[in-house]
Image (cartoon, rainbow, N blue to C red):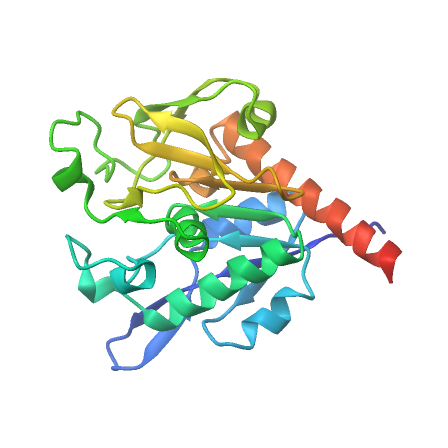
Amino acid sequence: MESKPLIAISMSRELGPDNVYRDFLRAPYLHAVVQAGGIPVLLPNVPESQEALLRCDGLLLTGGGDFDPAAYGALDAGTNQASISKDRDRTEIALVRAALQHKMPVFGICRGVQAIAVAQEGTLVQDIPRVYPTSDIHHNQSQPRQQATHGVTVLPGTKLHHVTETTDLRVNSFHHQALDKVPRGWNVAAHAEDGLVEAIEYPGNSWGIGVQWHPEDLVDSETHARKLFADFVDAARQYMEQERHNV
């Protein structure tokens, strides 16, 4: 039986009704990884997750609450302070840096692309309505998560273009923050009609893409979402085989 790559997945953290913090993950991420042929490995928000990451073959950074502005040298300008988890911030920053150092495939989704930015000297738009007051796009849509609601233009010649095989995507959108300063070493791969950066990619890695939308909720309806996960997991499989060769 062919071995499947292990996909490390970051987790959200929130304070439960019993006043105890809990780490958790939305199931669509698991479905998308399994459908693409990977084995999900959940990484809690503890320092030891860095060690666990190095036993895996790819890193998937998931959506969730806002980053502490102090993590990227900013003052509060619309961040949802109640959603901040400094433990998660520290964990994901360390995971991004470790994965890139080891040239491991990295896939960032929503907050995940923001984690990449914060870890690599980028900055964030803390509240889109404040910075883009005339935008007609509802980046935090009220429609169901499985419904694509706005367009994204993919730049020709990018890795994202190669993977999705199109320059025009329809995506879903559940965020009030986004990229401002693009992270060091990364390039813009797609943008929304209002100019907001919707995707970045890392040419210095075997596979590095971050998207602002939620493809895990679209894999059963949108071909481009399935292609993204399939290509990511395939890159993780190649990483796994290369690592075994080097042992």
Tell me if residue 241 can be seen. Answer: yes
Does 180 sit above or below residue 118? above
On the image, the x and y values in percent for residue 202 come to: 55, 40
Task: Tell whether 17 sits left or right of 130.
Answer: right
The quarter in which the C terminus is drawn is bottom right
Q: How many marks?
A: 0
Tell me if residue 3 can be seen. Answer: no
Residue that extends furthest to the bottom in the rendered view of this protein: 19
75 and 170: which is toward the camera: 75
Q: Residue at x 19, y 58 (%)?
A: 80
On the image, the x and y values in percent for residue 218 come to: 45, 35
Q: Residue at x 58, y 29 (%)?
A: 159
Task: Tell whether 206 sits left or right of 50.
Answer: right
Q: Residue at x 52, y 18 (%)?
A: 156
> Residue 146 sits in which quadrant?
top left
Does 240 sit above or below residue 234? below
Task: Tell whether 182 sits left or right of 61.
Answer: left
> Residue 85 sits in which quadrant?
bottom left
Q: Residue at x 44, y 57 (%)?
A: 119
Task: Tell whether 108 sits left or right of 207.
Answer: left
On the image, the x and y values in percent for residue 15 come to: 28, 74
On the image, the x and y values in percent for residue 75 come to: 19, 59
